[in-house]
Amino acid sequence: MLPFRSFCTIFLPSVIVVALPSPRARPQTNHAAPSGLRHHRPRSGDDPISLEEISFSHYKIFLDASSTLPPLKSDGEYAIRLHWQDLVKFIVSSSREYLAHTSNSPPDESTSHEVNAAVSGDGPSVPPRMKSNANQGRRPSGRTATPQSVLNYNRVGEGSSYPGSNDGSPLSPGSVYQPGTYPTPDLLKSPGSKFVLLSDPASYTSDTIQQALNSLGPYSVLYLPPRTRWAVKETIYLQPHQELATMGYPEDGKEIAWLEAEESCDGHMLSGANKPGVRIRNIGFDGGMEKYGPSKDREAMIKLGDLRGLDQVIDRCILRHPRGWSCLQVFEGGEDVRITNNRVGPAGYDEHVMGEGYWADGISYAGLNGLVAGNSVTDTTDGGIVIFGAPGTLVTSNTVVTRTRMASGAINLVDHLPYGGNYVGTSVVHNTIRMEGSFLGIGVAQGPSVWWLPKPNEAPVYNHGAVVRFNLITAAPNTTSSVGYGFAASDVDNWICTDNEVSTNVVFTGDTSRMPREPRLASIPSGPFVRSPSRAGSGPTRSILQAEFAEGPVHYLLGIRPGEPAYRTFLPGQLALALGEAVVLKRVKLSFDADGEVRVSSLGDAGETVLWEAGCRDLGRMEEGSKLSFDPLGNLGIVSGGGQMLCPLTPRLQPGIPDLVLELSSERPHLFIASSDTGSVYWSPMSYEVGHQWQAKEGSFVCLTTPDSRTVFLSGMNPLGQYVILRSVGDVVVPSALPWPVSQEQWQVDWKSHDVDDDQPDHESYVFFQDDGNLVIYSGTTGLPLWATASDESPSPVTHLRWSLEPVDGLTVSCLSRDGTVTWKSGTNGTESQHADFISP
């Protein structure tokens, strides 16, 4: 006979739920299939299911004749997503109602605890949210009535209704269960048939624990006495179907047994990798980061998953201070790994505390068809919960808090590996992210380019298939913390991100000085919902994203830091300053002053210093209601109240240039208009500068003009693989792409990088400013260098490129060191060492 803990049947009204023992050998699964319920027998499209058996993980559900599933799809199958949250909540809430109707006595203490946790969703009040939902339901509280329909079925994208909601409407965004209360009815507080309590060990060390585990063997439980501390000298290894727990399963951090890493423990503290059925329960883990600093190998503190890591559980543990990159890592290959009700963090330090930063995740999950639920994750510096594809995994009712340490991300779905961007069946629903004092970079990061910069000449990769719904970002009252970006999505496909909310007291800002500023890689300003522009046939065009998303370029949002923004971008139509108004950033401001002049000024302790004036003084106040406007066509200038252009500041641009943005920045260049689509800079009133990793392909260019905009200069790559500088002849319109061959009536070639044969185009060639300070043109055909400045040989390290106007030479391109020394300049082959701007900033 099977022991009680392995086999339990619960009789409920209209449904029978049977908890089955975990199989010793799991059949091969289709990893590409989404998680959830699937009816396996082919049926006709109108044939309902009655008295049918449906399998879900360790449970089987038998529906009676009164319960039916919706019609099947045309292919004879109907996929139904029934999450752990739905199933467990239904089981426990229905059990309570059943007991209430059949007994006058209250349930015992252990049952009452889990029942109350399941049916009570009341939590602390939260501030008003930015998005109001007319269909918004309330969280169930108290003793709810048994749902009229046993199960609610919803196709993807239709809104999820949960048992226990009296009106059948969705629950409010945010965690349904408070941290540590997520129901785990299969985790009983009684030992199996083979267990040992280490009540009086010879030494409280990992050696003693490992010897006991080895002696017990598989299918056993090792208990550690409450309030004991164990020195971990090296990795502890579990065997298949072993459980390591504190006797009595206490949850108080003062009552549980603690495993504390010694300096010699340089790898994992505990490993259950490749071992099916392991359980880790009610144990404290301290990785020793506070005592010993980061380890040499930087391994995760606890390792689970891997090819034979099936049906594993870590529940109600405390994980803190890892010396490696994560508190807990579930490797790919693992399946049905459950991480529930743990208290995770602090983990790692940012660069303001330790060197260049020793970042650490809270939970790093790459397994299949798993569960991450009911966890409290606090002060993890890299990602709070990081999902590596993990097809079929449910992430729900977790609370991520930033309190004393900066966090790069709360919940991340950015990694393309190890499943090639496959997030099919991965659901991030009903989680809460809460600011209580420190900075958070990104709330929910979705897609590779949110986290990383694309590599030169590398096509974008996409993550696909996830569902991100009913999550909440909020802040404690009177907190000084802020967020860079709330929900950010880029390079995602067949993706759902809807019904998420942000409280009105959440402040969105951040220092963007570490983020790229060149037009190809510059990003949208801070905000609650940001997404990359739609691309035809891929990305957001085949995704469902909620209406609050602001569209703009999204690259390397990971670079945002606490503080005031270093730059700000405006789309056409987004900037309109009335007389006397200004846009103020960290160290610079753009103002439309009372005298009618447009100015860019630097801000410092000594006050303001004017960097540039437009020369529109008095024109700007000629008519009442005049404004400084970046109009919908991409023109910057002073317009009258009636829309007439009084003082144009930019040259005439070719209509229809895609993705134009106006950027104001604390760093040089302080003001310019560019396109994130073409990579070209179409106007800058001062010299233009870029740092390492800048690149340009055929057709993209940098444009500078004389103060009266009568002479236009373009510098860019032509189809022959040359970098050239063009000067306008007469009145011209700035084109979308570098014109080639040039019309002698409009343009003349001032300078070219090298001579080539005109009949041998190289359309894939590109120019690249390397980290060593060398500016190099590479052939797109052979990959070999065609030309270089040799500025990497300079005694002073070259740090940036500058385009500037000079009185005689016109537009020049220069390689400069950090102190401003010119190591190479176009047209001089590096013989000049001095540099003078045509317009001094």
Image (cartoon, helix red, strand yellow):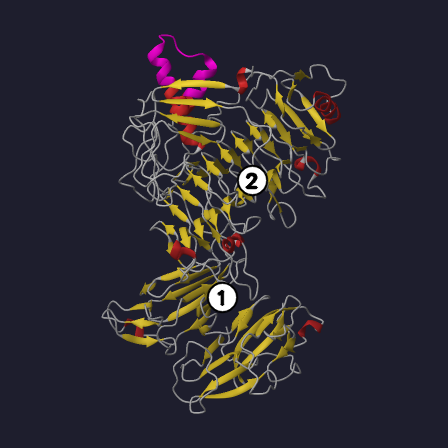
Determine whether, in the image, residue 377 is placed left or right of residue 37.
right
In the rendered image, residue 341 lying in the magenta stretch gets the answer: no
Amino acid type, mark 1: Arg
Q: Is residue 620 above or below residue 254?
A: below
Q: Nearer the viewer, residue 457 or 299?
A: 457
Q: Secondary structure at mark 1?
A: loop
How far apart, in angstroms, are the residues tagged by discs 1 and 2?
35 Å
The rendered magenta stretch, by its main secondary structure, is classed as helix
Q: Is residue 580 visible?
A: no
Residue 496 seen in render: yes
Residue 458 lies, with reference to residue 752, above or below; the image says above
Residue at horizontal 47 percent and vertical 82 percent from the top: 713
x%, y% of residue 87?
42, 29
Q: Which residues are magenta?
A: 96-115
* Tag of residue 367: 2
Return the mark for residue 520. Answer: 1
Quadrant of the rendering where the N terminus is positioned: top right
Tell me which corner region of the image, top left, top right, bottom left or bottom right, holds residue 236.
Answer: top right
| Residue 279 spot, x, y in % from top left | 60, 27
Q: Residue furthest top?
A: 104
